[in-house]
Image (cartoon, rainbow, N blue to C red):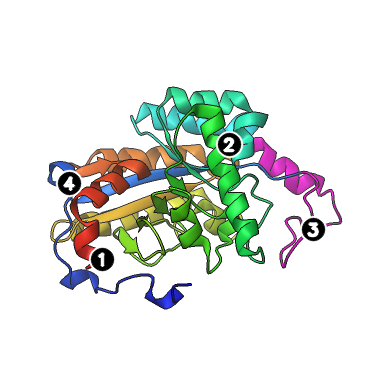
Amino acid sequence: MIDPEARFPHAPLPFRPKLTWPGGARLAVWVCPNIEHYEFLPARRGPRDPWPRTPHPDILSYSLKDYGNRAAVWRMMEVMDAHGIRGSVSFSMAVGEMFPEVLDAMLARDWDVFSHGIYNTRYHWDLTEEEERAEIGASVAAWKRMTGRRLRGWFSPAASNTFNTPDLVAEAGIDYICDFYHDDQPVPVRVRRGRLVSLPYQMDLNDGVMIAAGANEGEEFRRTAIDMFDTLYAEGQAQPRVMCVALHPYIMGRPHRIRHLDEVLAHMRRHEGVWFATGAEMCDWYLAHHHDAALR
């Protein structure tokens, strides 16, 4: 096993060779709806109870999340369509077979997908290496079965990353991972075999963290997103950056919050030199132009 602390070559961002983006863009923005499914009666395994509020079933919590695939995801798609922005979806693979209309709508929009596991109630923390390999393989196979396509990205369910995850993801033929939150640029990940890129994903600008716990509302999300964009856009003139907008339809797709997402995307669209990319597009560019030099 690779030493977890040696997985990422350390280079302070101001001292790195200049990152480039297509067309000389100073900032790559990717918008990441988490289109998930939470099981009604999940198996109780490991350190975390998916529904800790009440004995199972927790009808209230399940229903609030189920709203995402029934109503809110369609509202979010309409807003993103209005701004001409393709999503990069953190996708529970079960959604594609349980709610095929959602998958069809994503494919019609040519949205990118990275796996968020089969269900977002099946965590990986205490899986053996073989068990985790099987779970990752199940996502790869499910995406191939549903679409005929190769799975490009990975984000562990509920961020339940293990010491083995990067090696197993690369072994499965996946190109990028979103389990690490430590940089404003893509970085290479050292793995036993193959190549793997860590793409910047957000946990602080993330409606699941900001709003779901009840500490903030849509107004705070909008202000934070615009502040983050303005800072990264200014910094990107000297050293280009990445901004991730991490969303959950059952949160930001609610009727009283959707206008705040609309305003965030409109603010970004008013700026030149912004590349609205998918995860696969960023990964491909980085692999072609920067990965090998950064790893050396």
**CA separation, marks 2 and 1?**
31 Å
Percent of width and height locating residue 22: 17, 43
Q: Which residues are magenta?
A: 40-67
Q: Which mark is residue 44?
A: 3
Where on the picture, by quarter, is residue 97?
top right
Q: Nearer the viewer, residue 223 or 100?
A: 100
The dominant secondary structure in magenta is loop
Q: Is residue 144 above or below residue 152?
A: above
Element type at marker 1?
Answer: helix
> What amino acid is found at the position of numbered circle 2 in the picture?
Ala
Location of mark 1 (residue): 295
Residue 53 position in % (x across, y down): 79, 58
| Disc 3: CA contacts within 10 A as few (<14), some (14-19) or many (>=20) | few
Q: Which mark is residue 25?
A: 4
Q: Is residue 109 left or right of residue 141?
A: left
Label ID, residue 142: 2
Query: Label 3 to label 4, Cα distance in Å?
Result: 47 Å
